[in-house]
Amino acid sequence: MYYEGKVYRPWMEANSLLIQTTLGCTHNKCTFCDMFREKRFRIRKIEEIFKDIDEARQSYPHVRSIFLIDGNVLALKTEFLLKILGKITSTFPECSKISLYAGFNDLRRKSVEDLKELKQEGLTLAYTGLESGDPVTLERIKKGLTPEQAEKGMAKAKAAGIDILVSIIFGIGGKERSREHIVETTRLLNILKPEQIAPMALAVQSGTELAKQVETGAFIQATPLQILEEEKYLLKNLVGFETIYWGDHGNNIVSSRGNLPKSRELFLGKIDHAIANHPVTEQEVLVTSPW
């Protein structure tokens, strides 16, 4: 099978078969991200994709989950995606989950009818980076997204029956805007009501625009205590819907995975214990590993 450049997939997809469908990211301007800096966005030829699917079938007798990479796969034309999904479902009839990366604007630009067709052909889950619900923070990190656009994209996904996992980043507002970031992010999540939420602590990637801002002092990182307080606020104030909480990213200070609101008190207890006892709260900056 063929893979070009660095390959990324969510930590929840560790056991999924990866099919490289696009290369790079259609946006590729976020100040914090270096996932696809070395790639110019392009679409692989469908013959190449089909060849990988056929070769994977020869290698794996049973595939339960498939994840389409690289970034923003949903930006592809619906007809093209339908052909890929059809090839997957016919080649791997036992596969029960097909997921991909998608931006809220990718969802927004599709018609509900298009999304329903994709759902019918096998698409079950889209991983969507929100990062923050604070419009000021979104502009500063050059996300190319507004809260209103996120709402429109989510509305279409829900109308089509496609589950959405929303990722957010603790600390992305920096020390100065920590409170506004988490308050607005929580508010927006309560509107979006995503089926799954994946929070992760900010990792400043070497060579990114954000790393340069840290070096010059234009961006002052949130403290570990602020990051814990952000997660506490989020857990206390997510209301009105059930979701799967993937709070076990390797960079998070506290690891929590489970269903909300069922596990809310358990998770809050872990956060309170860390705030009171974890030595990291005495540090100015959380040391993290690259994503």
Image (tube, grey):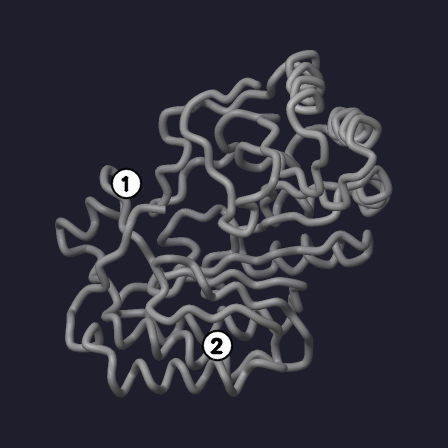
Q: Is residue 79 visible?
A: no
Q: Amino acid at mark 2?
A: Leu
Q: Residue at x 71, y 42 (%)?
A: 64
Residue 237 vertical placement versus 47 (above, below): below
Q: Of residues 138 and 172, which is closer to you in this image?
A: 172
On the image, the x and y values in percent for residue 56 come to: 66, 23
- Label 1 near label 2: C-beta < 8 Å? no
Quarter occupied by residue 138: bottom left
Q: Earlier in the sequence, mark 2 or mark 1?
A: 1
Circle 1: residue type: Thr
Q: Residue at x 23, y 70 (%)?
A: 223
Residue 208 is labelled as 1
As helix, strand or loop, the secondary structure at mark 1 comes to loop
- The foreground one among 229 and 172 is 229
Query: Which x, y percent locates residue 228?
Result: 34, 76
Residue occupying image coordinates x 54% and y 18%: 2
Q: Which mark is residue 234?
A: 2
Residue 114 x, y percent position in the rendering? 82, 39
Residue 52 percent location from the top left of the image:
64, 19
